Image: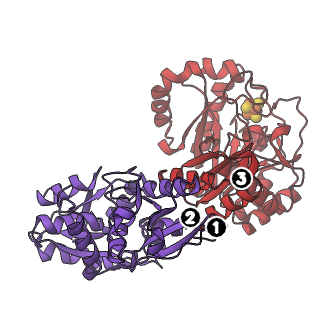
Chain colours: A purple, B red
Amino acid sequence: MSKPLIVGSVAYTPNVVTIWEGMRDYFGDGQAEMDFVLFSNYGRQVDALLDQTIDLAWNTNLAWVRTVLQTRGECRAIAMRDTDTVFQTVIVARAGAGADGLESIRGKRLALGSKDSAQAAILPLHYLKREGVDVDDVDLIRINSDIGKHGDTGRSELDALSAVLDDRADFAALGINTWNGIGREELMPGAFEAVWESPTYSHCNFTALPGLSDDRVAPWLDALFAMDWDNPAHQPILEMEGLRTWVPPKLDGYTSLFEAVDEQGISPRW
Amino acid sequence: MVNYHVVLDLARRVNNAPHGAMVTVPLDAGSEPGLQRIIADWCDHTGNELVRIEDMLATVRRGRSDPLGGLAAGQLPGSRVWIYTNFDCNLACDYCCVRSSPQTPRRALDSGQIRQLAAEAVEAGVGELVLTGGEPFLLPDIAELVEICTDALPTTLLTNGMLFKGRRLESLRRMNRDRLALQISLDSVTPDLHDRHRGRGSWDRALAGVRIAIAEGFRVRIAATLMPEHVETLAQFHDFLDTLGIASEDHLIRPLAHQGVADHGIVLTVESLIPEVTVTADGIYWHPVSAVDDDHLVTRDIFPLASAISQVRSTFRQQRAHAAAAAQWFPCA
Ligand code: SF4
């Protein structure tokens, strides 16, 4: 029997323990046995992957980009959630503010989430630049409330929304998950409206180093892809992890973040 | 204007809470009832459970759960039904939770009622009947009552074991050994402690009853009421039951409940007790340990049994949703 695959994950909520214990139980003790190690931040997790302390890292998009940069492209992504292939950034304003599109942010106050959040800080600046809005013409309000966790907690995005409600900011940058989580425009009538939605991009993936052999990964991946939303034993884990089905990685969805990291001079490490 | 900060605050706290945990946020005085509706909609939308909005506080549980979901199968109210056949007893124990004694009026269920209960219990998906009293062997028709029950479902009969003589021994012998377990009360390894609470000579006679029941081929469970002074002798007590041939899963030790004539013991309330549907001649009660306590009366209507069971379940479901951690399991069998 081969040794269990050790998966690293960042503990951004206490529910991470429940999720990974559920995953470990699902994989059982057969060919695809796994265990997990939790980290307090993605920097430490990527270090552990590079040191081969863990076999797989459940990485955010920024952690993936940093792993690629540190391994000079030697690492590989092996799977992601269906929801990771269609992630988006949304810019919201107070309802009725009359704003529309990124151009309307010029000269205004934009609340960004944690500086290591791709969805709420790094990509919004990248898209502004791409639209021809010089970030020097925008009053950036940075809310770095969950550094190290790459925005996973959603805390900095909710804080950015509070800043808009309090008129400390005109706009807030959010991940689509947070926007959906507060019910978009519908749940709080008259509170917020979306003024811009980004193209879709890729978010998390399971990252492996080349040293991890196929005969260890293949059975694990087979079992992963066999998780079934319609199976009542699998559904609670899938629901908590925020997906319906595991899918192969969509690598072209990371292009925008590679460009953003390069433009903004973001360090490849931590 | 509705204060949307409350919703953002709720989202922040719920995001950070473990599945199943409760989160409470203060509401803003000026923003009801619009805010209440928004919080309810938000919970619905995000798959969390609004437990209550009360006293300007909203309480939300992370995730959604059936409040009865965490119970073991045997703890689901209605998985078994307790039936007080009668309340009179040949003993007058000083801790009796239902105030039984030789002077207590009988207040018995007749064989017609027992028959209907047994039939409705099967219909309602009940898995086991538990007959208790008072002392059931005081009833002249106890063998018939037990037969009605064992014909319907596996049954346990609680007794003090002291009356297995003459026609009552004959009644015992007529009972179905494959479908009936006897639960006999025995509190200690030696007579002193048992007799102090249950009457002089009662330990000897109860022990004789245990031996008769075993010799007659019945499965016997021993139920002991745990007194504070008893705690050090617990290991000895288990050894003693082993020597009698009582299987270890049939050693049932429970704490003294402050009910009936007991002047001390743990205080049990409807809120703190996982219910066990209990039928008496006076109505349906929350739990056998409190079957003479008006506060624990569920309904005066014994029939239909299924509606009594669903009434107990729905009250319990609401309570569990409100105070998930408060209930304690008080075993009687
Ligand atoms: S505890 Fe049992 S034996 Fe004692 S008086 Fe009550 S019903 Fe009778």
Is the distance from the Cβ of mark 3 to the nearest ligand 1 atom less than 8 Å? no
**3D distance between C-alphas at marks 1 and 2:** 7 Å
Residue to which mark 1 is pinned: A187
The subunit carrying tag 1 is A
Q: Is residue B184 above or below residue A15?
A: above
Q: Name the residue type under label 3.
A: Gln
Residue to which mark 3 is pinned: B318
Around disc 3, counting alpha carbons within 10 Å, would you say few (fewer than 14), some (14 to 19), or many (20 or more)?
some
**3D distance between C-alphas at marks 3 and 1:** 27 Å
Quarter of the rendered image showing ligand 1: top right
**Same subunit under labels 1 and 2?**
yes
Q: Is residue B191 above or below residue B225?
A: above
**3D distance between C-alphas at marks 2 and 3:** 27 Å
Location of residue A72 (image quadrant):
bottom left
Query: Of label 1 and label 2, which has the lower sequence position?
Result: 2
Q: Name the residue type under label 1.
A: Leu
Q: What secondary structure is found at the residue carrying circle 1?
A: loop
| Residue B273 as seen in the image, left or right of residue B9 | right
Location of residue B255 (image quadrant):
top right
Q: Name the residue type under label 2.
A: Ile
| Residue B185 as seen in the image, left or right of residue A264 | right
Image x and y of residue A154, in percent: 44, 58
Location of residue B311 (image quadrant):
bottom right
Asked if one can make out residue B75 in the rendered structure from this viewpoint, the answer is: no
Residue to which mark 2 is pinned: A182
Do the residues bearing badges 2 and 3 touch, measured as CB atoms within 8 Å?
no
Image x and y of residue B213, in percent: 62, 43
